[in-house]
Amino acid sequence: MHNLGHKNTNTPKEPQPKRVEEVYRALKNGLDEYLEFHQTELDKLTAQLKDMKRNSRLGVLYDLDKQIKTIERYMRRLEFHISKVDELYEAYCIQRRLQDGASKMKQAFATSPASKAARESLSEINRSYKEYTENMCTIEAELESLLGEFSIKMKGLAGFARLCPGDQYEIFMKYGRQRWKLKGKIEVNGKQSWDGEETVFLPLIVGFISIKVTELKGLATHILVGSVTCETKELFAARPQVVAVDINDLGTIKLNLEITWYPFDVEDTTPSSGPGNKTAALQRRMSMYSQGTPETPTFKDQSFFVGKGM
């Protein structure tokens, strides 16, 4: 399995308050979904434990109690994570208001008489404006480090009559500085074989996922099937999502992906009853090659792009 994700240590030069707000809202919704999911599981297991205490073996009760405690620990971690996100966003909003105030003062002094006092005041305002701007950029980078990760599984191309045995394709995904390239072939039996199965992208505040699909006709002949740019806000969800990406304008070629969002790093312990358990998480690190040849899938047409082109 590819792991092309990396921590983005570069602080942005210009703050993006509108985008930060959008990502914050989407992140909060996703974290709340995770919390709600685990609360439901906890309630179910707690009720089950109460019923089983009357006539169950001690070992079974111990395992169930251990599972409940694992979920409780994970929920406490989620709650702490949410509080960190809220605290950062609140600090960001304060710096944004200060920056807006400094910007308005700059405009006011720019139209005032050019006295020595006015120049000194303007110089001080400029320093403050720069400080608030830098603070916003720093907070953006800190918030981005709390976005978790996207696990992306290749589910195959869907093209109905467009996909023929022997056809070969190359798929290239770009997300900020993160890359994933894989090649595949349509087999005689309708199945597909790909040299890559899964990758991990670390979510970004600014930037969309760009996808380009190329048909390989020969050593020197590559035909562009299409390219799209995909929004990522909708991916902050507690459950895996299967998305069908329209690659060309007519929608006759689709790329099917299964995307799972994890609030924390893949190596972190997650409860076995969660939307993605630890075993599944660790398996995502194991192999970059498909163990099988998935058949050409057919999914419902689900739009997942914001525009054509790279």
Image: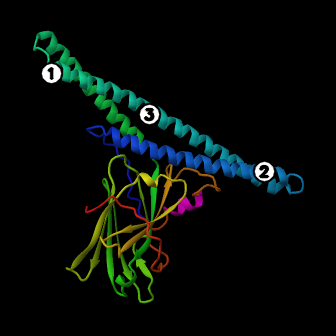
SS for dot 3: helix
Q: Distance between the Cα atoms at labels 1 and 2?
A: 68 Å
CB under 8 Å between callouts 1 and 3?
no
Residue that numbered label 3 is attached to = 88
Of residues 107 and 227, the one nearer the viewer is 107
Which circle marks residue 146 in the picture? Answer: none
Principal SS element in the magenta part?
helix
User: The N terminus appears in which quarter of the rendering?
Assistant: bottom left
Is 196 on the left-hand or right-hand side of 207? right
Visible residue check, residue 64? yes
Labels 1, 3: front one:
1
Residue 244, quarter of the rendered image: bottom left
SS for dot 2: helix
Of residues 226 and 174, the one nearer the viewer is 226
Is 115 on the left-hand or right-hand side of 264? left
Give percent across and percent down for residue 300. 47, 71
Is 60 on the left-hand or right-hand side of 277? right
